[in-house]
Amino acid sequence: MIEIMSRTTTATSLTGDFAETQWQQVLERDTSADGQFFYGVKSTGIVCKPSCPSRRPTRENVRFFPTLTDAFEAGFRACRRCNPDSTAPRPDPHGRVIARVAKYLGDHPGQRVTTEALAKAAGVNRLTLLRAFRRVFGVSPAQYARTLRLNTFKEKVKEPKMRVTDAIYDAGFGSSSRLYENSSARLGMTPREMRNGAAGIIVRYSTSNSPLGRMLVAATNKGICTIAFGDCDAEVKAILQDRFPNAKLVAEEAKSGWLADAVAFVTNQMSEHPVAATFPLDVRATAFQQRVWKALQEIPRGETRTYSGLAADLGAPSSTRAVAGACAANPVAVVVPCHRVVGKSGSLTGYRWGVERKRKLLEAEKKSMRIA
C-alpha cells in the first residue's frame, strides 16, 4: 500500500534537473514563476519568490521549495524585500499534496507505481495530480520518477563492487533495454563506460585565446564534445575533467589536423565573418534537448529569441522551463548558440559562461550583420 499522506513529512526541496530550470527562472526574475516555487538562500536564511529584485545569490547557496511552508519548515524566513508570504500569487492549492507525492517518489526511486495509484493515495483524481504536478515541477509524475531512477542508476553504477546489471535492476529498470530506452540520449556514454568514469575513451583537446577569453575545444573521434570558456587553462581543463573524469585526455597543439579544424571552426563562429559550414558533434541529448538545440541553430545571426518565444516556436508554449533547462545543458557553446536566448524584457539573464561573454557575443553578431 502506498502511504504518502502523512503530515509529518519533512520539508521537501526541488533538486537535480528540476532545480536547474528553476534557477534559470530566478536568474531571469521570471514573474510568471511566482507562486510556483520559492528559493531559499542558505547564507542568509532568507526565502524569496523567483522575481525578487534582490541581488542574485550564488548557485551553491540556493535551495528550491515547491511551497513557502516547506521553506519555513526548513528554517528559512521570508524576505522583507519581495514579501513572498504576502505579495506572491497564491501557491498551488495542491502544492502540499504534490510535495508529499514527490517525496514518496524520491524515497522509493526503484519502485514502479502508476499515476492512478499515486492519485488515489493522495486523495485527488488522476487529472488533478497530472496538472498540479506539471505546474509545480514542470514534468509529469512518470517523467519525474524516470529521472529519479536514472539518477539512482548513475550513483549505483559508480560503486566499486556493483555490477552494471545489478545497478540497472536496483534502480528500478526492468531490463537493460528499458534503461537505454529511457536514458540512452541523456547518459552520453554506455552504462559500462559510465561505471568506469569514461575510462578508455580518448578525448583530445586544445586550449587557445579567443574573443571570450581562454577557450578549450575537445573532441572524440566522432566530433566536438565540449567547448568551454574561462580565465585560464586550469579552469577550462577542470571543466573537461569533470565531464570525463577517467577518460584519456590528450592535450594537443591545434596546428594541423582534425582538432585544428575544429578549433578554427569554433573561433570563426565568433568572428565577423563566420564559417557557413557545419562541423560534426559528438553530444548526446534527450529528444527535447535536440529539438531545442536545433531551434537555437536556426535563430539568424544577430537576432535573439525569448525562452517563451522559443517554446512557442517548438509548438509547446508551456515548456518554457524545459527550454531553459535545455539551454543550460548545452555543452558546446557558440556552435549551439544558446546565447541568442534572452529574457522577456530583453535582459541577458544567465549564461553558463557569464553574462559579459554573452553580451560580447551578441554585440559581435549584431555588428557583423550591420557590416554585411
Image (spheres, rainbow, N blue to C red):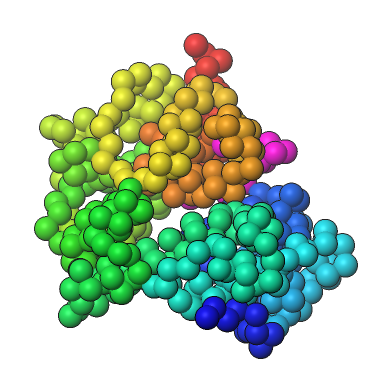
Q: Nearer the viewer, residue 108 or 237?
A: 108
Image quarter for residue 18? bottom right
* Residue 363 placement (x, y as % from top left): 55, 30
Residue 292 is covered by the magenta coloring: no
Query: Residue 156 vs residue 231: left or right?
Result: left
Residue 365, compared with residue 336, is above or below; it is above
Query: Residue 19 vs residue 11: left or right?
Result: left
* Residue 226 placement (x, y as % from top left): 31, 46
Stretch in magenta: 341-355
Write the residue at 58% across / 32% down. Answer: 315
The answer to whether residue 233 shows anywhere in this view is no
Write the residue at 44% across / 49% down. Answer: 329
Write the residue at 65% across / 80% down. Answer: 5
Query: Residue 20 vs residue 35: left or right?
Result: left
Number of numbered tags placed on the structure image: 0
Q: Nearer the viewer, residue 338 or 185?
A: 185
The answer to whether residue 279 shows anywhere in this view is yes
Residue 308, compared with residue 87, is above or below; it is above
Image quarter for residue 164? bottom left
Residue at the outermost right position: 86
Residue 353 is covered by the magenta coloring: yes
Q: Please, what is the dominant secondary structure of the magenta stretch?
A: loop
